[in-house]
Each structure stands twice: as structure tokens, then as C-alpha cells.
Amino acid sequence: MANVDDQARVQALHAILHRYAHQYYVQDVPQVPDAEYDRLFQELQALEAAHPEWVTPDSPTQRVGGKPLDQFAPVRHAVPMLSIRTETDTEASGAQNFDTRVRKELGLTETDPPVEYVAELKFDGLAMNLRYERGVLVQAATRGDGETGEDVTQNIRTIKQIPLRLSYVAPTLGSGVSSLPPEGALAPWGGPAALGVPPVLEVRGEVYMRRDDFEALNERQRARIAAGEKGEKTFVNPRNAAAGAVRQLDPGIAVQRPLSFFAYGLGEVTPVEQGGPSFGTHYDMLQTLKRWGFPVAALVATADGAPELIAYHQHIGQTRDQLPYDIDGVVYKVNSLALQQRLGFVSREPRWAVAHKYPAQEQMTTVLGIDVQVGRTGKLTPVAKLAPVFVGGVTVTNATLHNEDEARRKDVRIGDTVVVRRAGDVIPEVVSVVLPAETVERGAEFTMPRICPVCGSAAVREEGEADYRCTGGLFCSAQRKQAILHFAQRRAVEVEGLGDKLVEQMVDAGIVKTLPDLYRLGLTAQAAIQQMSVDELFQTLSVQERTKLAVEELKTLERMAQLSAQNIFDALEKSKRTTLPRFLFGLGIRHAGEATAKALARHFGKLDAIMDASEEQLLDVSDVGPIVAQSIRTFFEQAHNREVVEQLRACGLTWEEGEPAVQAPKPLAGKTFVLTGTFPTLSRDDAKDLLEAAGAKVAGSVSKKTDYVVAGAEAGSKLEKALVLGVAVIDEAAMLALLVGDAEGGNKGSS
């Protein structure tokens, strides 16, 4: 006979596990360790194994189950899943045009108040309809042709963000933790009806794959391919990977492909007079979906009129590349549901909504050739030379292939048609090859050259490395130019005004062959640099302007060039007074970045101590691991590198040196900060230096591991994400107070 206490325990475990899963997968604020969740999950599995009759469709154990299907069953949508009109005008006028059409349809004049809209992200995924009956998920169907989709319930159950049973989730508090019913309460805490969940509820949204999940999936696929597993392949982009996972006939395969979900609308819903919900606005509906346990994108906003729609479109466009998932535009909807009903539809598209696109980030073009570029550290990078194509807002003619392994894995060859991707400021890359339907002869497979294409030195691939590197060092002019630019950059020794063009000219002319040559420029070199400046200024003029130059104008041009050259020499003289961390960073030691240079300077105090340190001594430095220690040791073991350092000293470069730092505990050790916006008195670099000096780590993005976000004026998406995750947000004053408080032996102001 069944034990009543065991049956009650099963229901309690349902409630607890659903709550923990919601906190982890939707709110991103896990409250218990993974081991505790696993322990409770295993307890539920054991109870259900002993009493199979207690297993229900909404049990957390049923997220993965069922046999592979022969085919998907068709599902006719009770309410058609219609498409939204796409506004292909990617400029501000796209939003203005939509607002003008809405106001015209509503009969509004210029004196009438602005229309209120809801602005949302247009996710690059797969539309999905989730059907709940009495609060339990009973069916998931694709859009299909809008009238009929496919039943993919088994696969959608694997998405842990999607609730199997609807339960009340209170609005998120400032701490980022929701006020939930007690742990022992039975799901669904009063029942769906008591929570306003209608007997029939269809929720519509987007199934997508996060970028980090996509990269991890492709990494696993590459490992399987390398292991010789047949039938495996990598995926072109997150959308294709998500669509493929949703349409897997075997849910056991689908669960291996991490999917996510955002809710944004409704399908069939029980009418109000029969117990259904009543909403006044689209925004209210989204907030209710959130309270019922559905993930709703944080970047949803109301907007009054066209100006605020334009501002939203521009803001999202600027932060688009920092989002953890792909979007291809934003969606505007009239907020009032009554006005939506008045506006109605045209050609099966709602008049009250529009999708406002951004420039496409992927396009197809042809590979004209494959060149190999040499970087500052000697890294050889294959680069596809492309037929010009407009993608991501610019015309692209080059795209990286990363390394030999990637070029071969994608099998990119000269003459191929390829998909090219460019997202924001990211370097364009070849995503995949589009093979023709018929068999055609292709170019030869790409092979990395074994000699440097710039200087002819041997190119070698270190064990465990993906990249080939030129062994020519500063002998290689490609590395020489990049080494000088790295040394002269703002975060290193800083030679203001020494840019790419001038460095290229000086190296090509043989004026500068090593770093110390910069500080030994004689009168002949000065005259040459002045002439280079004249040439550079001359090149800025049109052909017509050049032919019309009068004698006086030529003299003016020469005076400008003379001043430009003098500014360079003044900047070189100023750069001789630097700091030890900047000097170390400027040397361009492989694997040794800014943070490592600062850590070395703090630990050893003197340059000679760093140069003579053994690998074991280097490993005592925070921020230095085995690879970095070996790289630093190898650098200073090379006689020509030590010679460069001594010559720079002889040229007059100086910095303060001190005694080795006493390794006292850092007051902010173990704390992670993220900086965003503009601060009243400090630059971002100054704030970073202060925090790092106190032992803190300064990260570039916000996560649940972030301790503090320091927000200034015009803070962007990092602030928004901090608020969503419940991360502490402080201003510059609070940060300074934190530093002062810690320096005095406490943690004042950190709570």
C-alpha cells in the first residue's frame, strides 16, 4: 500500500525542484549548490521508480523521456501564428514610418498625444507555441506555415527554462532573489486557478541557443569529429543549431544541445468570462507571464512615440554585440490591447506591430585568394581575400580563417562561395563554405607555409599550439612594426602621435630596425620623417587640389609637416619617463599582459630581479602560471632581448624601482568588479588601476560571479544585466569609500 507521507514528499519535491530550476535557469540566481539539487532529484527518481503510478507529465524527471519518433505529428494552431511585417529600412526613418502609419490608422492628429508602444528584441531563433491545460504543459508546436505546425513536445521538455507546471513567482526583489512560498509547500501553491492561470493557456515565444552554449556545442562536435565518429558535423550558427535540436526525432539527442527560451506573446487563452485573464496592455501581459514562471527578456521597454522607438533601436544596435544571444532587429508593438484590436490586420500581418531590422551580419561572397599575415608575436594567420560584400554595415574584402586547423576544418578553398559574418567591431570571419549541388572541381586544400611570408624565417608550430609562428623576431619587419606600435601604445610606454602609417614608413625606409632606434634618430632621420609627414599631408589632398598648390601653400604644408615631426620627437622625449609595469608590458612578452606586468613589478620591485628570476620564482607571483612563467623566462634568456632592454636604458628610459613588495593580503582580493559609464573624477583606466592595486579583479562583463558593478553616467547594458542578476551597483564615490575603508582594515561601504 502506498505511503501517504511518500506521496506528499513527491509533491513537495516537485515544488522544490521546480523552484530551484527556475532560480537557476530563468533568474540566474541559484540558491543551492548543484550537489543539493542532484540529491533531491535522485530522491524523487527513487520514489517514482518505486511508485510509477505517481509519475506525472509535470514531474522534473520527465524533462527527458520517451522513445524516438518516426515522424512529428501535425498540430493545427487554434489561433494562427501569423508573421510580423519587416521594416527593412535600418535607419531611424524605419521607426518613424511605423509610427506615422499607426497614427494615420487611428485617426490621430499632430495635437494628439504620442502612442505608447512596447519595444522588444527580435530573437534569431525558432518560434514556438506552448499549450498549458490546467497549468500543465501538454503540447509544444512549431510555427510551420502559421496554420499547422509540428508536435515537438518531447524535445521542448528538455529546455529547463520552460516550466512543466505553472507556479507563482513573486516579482524579483532588489537583491535579485524572489520571494517564494516556503520550501515544503506543495506545487502549484494554491493551484493555477488561484494564481490567475486560465484553464487553457498558449504561450508563444522563441527557442534559441546562447552564443556560449553554441561555441561549447561546436567544441564538442569538433572533438567527436577528431575522434573519428561518423555522421558528426559542426553547426554554422546558433539559429541553425537550435532549429536542428528542436526537430530531432530522438529527444536523447536533443537534450545534448543546450536550448533556451523567451516568452513574448499568447495564442489561445480561455476567455475572461470563462475564467481567463484580463490584460489592458501587452506590457502587463509580459509581466504576468514572468510571474507565472516564464523567462521574459530583460530588455523590454515601453516607448512613447517615434523618438523613443528610435532611441531604443539605436541603443540596442550599439549593445547588440554584447548580448549573450543573436538578434537581427527589434520589434515594436502598440501597447494598448484595445488599440491593437482597433488596428486589426492587413494581409495576415498585424497593423499594430513591426520588426525593425539591423544590417545583416552574414552574407555570401567568393574567395578570391588566401593570404597569410604575420602578427606582432609572429603568429601566422590565414586571411581569405573576398569579392567585396556589404555585411554588418560595412564593405568587407578580408575575413580571418584563424589558423590552419580552422581553415581545413571549414575546408575553405580559392574560388569557393562562403558565408561571411561580421558582428559590430568583430573582425570578419568565414563561417562556412556553400558547396554547389553538382560536383565541381575545387581549388587545392589550404596548407600553412613553413616559412614566414614576410622575412623567410622558419615558421614553427609549438606542441599543443594551434598557431604557426615566425621565428625571425625583430628581424622580421612585420613583427618589428607591430612591436614598435605595441611599445608606443597608450597603455604601454606611450609615444603620442606615433601611428601605424609613420611606423610603417620608418621601418620600410630602414630608419628604425629595433626599439632603441626610436630614441637614436639623428638629423638625417628627422629630415626623412619631416618629408614623410609632408607626403602624408599631401596624400590627403585631391588630385585637383595638388595641381593647384601655390608656392606659399607648399611652404605652409612643409611648416605643418615640420611641426608634426617635432611633436613626435617631443613625445619620444616625454616617453622616456615611464613606469616599470608600462615598460614591461611594452616589451611585448608573449602571454604577459598588463595585469601580469603590474603583478611582476609589485612582486619583484626591480627590472633586473624580474630578468634574472627563475621559473619557480616567477610562479610565486599572483597572476603568473606555468605557461606565462616559461614565456617570461624564455624571453629574458634571449641575448638579443636583453640587449634591447640595455640599449633602451642607455637611451635614457627611466622608471621608479622599489624593494620587493611584502605580500600582505590585498583588501579587495577575491572581489570582482565591472566598470561601466563615465565617472565624475576618474577615467576608467584610473579606476581599474586603483581596484587592481587593492587586489580586485576588473572584468569586462557582468555575471553572477561579479561582486560589484561601478556605474557612472550613461551606463549601458552592463548596468541592466547587473540589475537583472541582483549584483550590487555602486557609484564612484562608493567605490572610493570601499577602497579607503578597506585600507583602514575593514570593508566599510561594501554591503
Image (cartoon, helix red, strand yellow):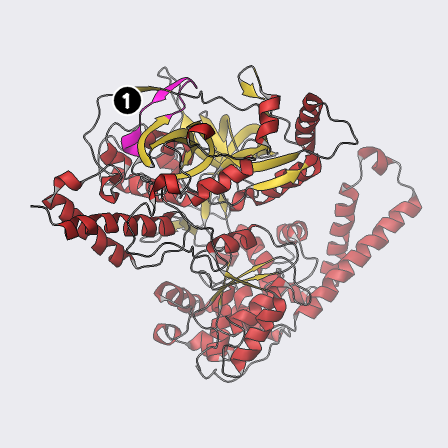
- Is residue 706 on the magenta stretch? no
Against 612, residue 425 (above or below) is above
Q: Is 61 left, or right, of 544 in this rendering?
A: left
* Residue 56 in which image quadrant: top left
Label 1 neighbourhood size at 10 Å, few (<14), some (14-19), many (20+)?
some
- Asked if residue 547 is positioned above or below residue 737 in the image, the reply reads above
Q: Is residue 474 left or right of residue 437?
A: right
Q: Range of the magenta residues?
A: 142-155
Judge whether residue 651 can be spotted in this image: yes
Residue 152 belongs to magenta span: yes
Report the residue that reaches farthest toward the left: 1
The percent position of residue 105, horizontal first and vertical second, equals 68, 21
Q: Which of 197 and 409 is in front in this view?
A: 197
- Residue 61 in which image quadrant: top left
Say whether residue 444 is left or right of residue 478. left
Which percent across, then down, holds residue 9?
Answer: 20, 52
Q: Could one spot residue 466 in this view of the protein?
A: no
What is the x, y in percent for residue 264? 48, 35
Say what secondary structure mark 1 lies in: loop
Using residue 388 as the reference point, say whether residue 108 is left or right of it: right
Judged from this view, the residue extending furthest toward the front is 273
Most foreground residue, 206 or 559: 206
Is residue 190 positioned above or below 392 on the image?
A: below
Question: Which of 139/370 is in front?
Answer: 139
Residue type marked 1: Phe
- Name the residue tied to disc 1: 72
Q: Relative to the observer, which residue lies in front, 374 or 63?
A: 63
Q: Quadrant of residue 576?
A: bottom right
| Residue at the spot 81% in from the left edge and 57% down from the top edge | 562
* Residue 321 at x, y percent in the picture: 53, 43
Residue ID at (69%, 65%): 680
